[in-house]
Amino acid sequence: KKKARRYRGRKQGSEGGGAGDEWRRRLPAAAFSPAKETIGGRRMEVKLKDLVPAATNTVNTTFIVVDKAPRPAHANAHGREETCPSLVADETAAVHFLLWGTECDAFESGDIVRLTSGIFSYHRGNNLFLRAGKRGRMEKVGEFTMMFVETPNMSEVRWGPDPGDPRKMVQEAVVSPYSQVFKPLH
């Protein structure tokens, strides 16, 4: 009879909260909320120019919805939820944002939105999108009164592994300073 081994680290594919996260209980509290990520218990917001593709829900930011593609008029034949790409920006950069399902109707151009625990990653191939994901949360916090820029567009940057640390991504080249999906406003 084979004896089951107990794995003390994070289990591959584990999303947290299970037995694979028992190592968190042994670490000091400071290990979970370094000063660069939290201030007074609240997560720090990141500017769009500082986004880096990652497979974790760690993006907290506020932006304005600059433009939004119309919701598809047809029902999705593949049984997947409908998506609406949009262009969002803050005072440092712009990025493509993906709205899912009911989010397509909930947000319009000119809305100022706070994103908590969002994710900036590839969606359907080589398209980089910022999105709420399963764990993220979006909240409308205002309308029309926010300074923003349309360039650089962080979704139009080609990323590659950092030669010094392959777990991190670095910018390799700028594909286009402006969005290739949405025309510039000027």
Image (tube, helix red, strand yellow):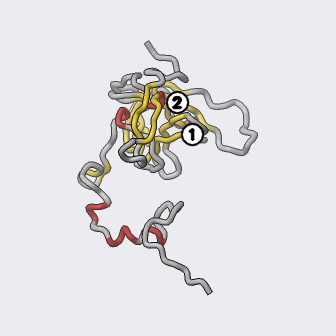
The residue type indicated by label 1 comes to His
Do residues under tags 2 and 1 come within 8 Å of each other at their CB atoms?
Answer: no
Q: For this view, does 42 lie left or right of residue 71?
A: left
| Residue 9's disc number | none
Query: Which residue lies most toward the bottom here?
Result: 1
Q: Residue at x 49, y 52 (%)?
A: 135
The residue type indicated by label 2 comes to Ser
Q: Residue at x 49, y 44 (%)?
A: 132
Residue at mark 2 = 86
Q: Residue at x 48, y 27 (%)?
A: 109
- Dot 2 alpha-carbon crowd within 10 angstroms: few under 14, some 14 to 19, many 20 or more: many
Q: Position of residue 32 (x, y in %)?
A: 32, 60
Q: Is residue 31 above or below residue 151?
A: below
Q: For this view, does 134 lie left or right of residue 72?
A: left
Residue at mark 1 = 123
Give the image quarter of residue 25: bottom left
Q: Is residue 177 above or below residue 85?
A: above
Labels 2 and 1: the sequence-earlier one: 2
The alpha-carbon separation of the residues under discs 2 and 1 comes to: 14 Å
Query: Which residue lies most toward the top here?
Result: 186
Q: Position of residue 186 (x, y in %)?
A: 43, 12
Q: Position of residue 185 (x, y in %)?
A: 46, 16
Q: For this view, does 103 lie left or right of residue 94?
A: right
Q: Closer to the camera, 110 or 81?
A: 81
Give the image quarter of residue 162: top left
Element marked by disc 1? strand
Element marked by disc 2? strand
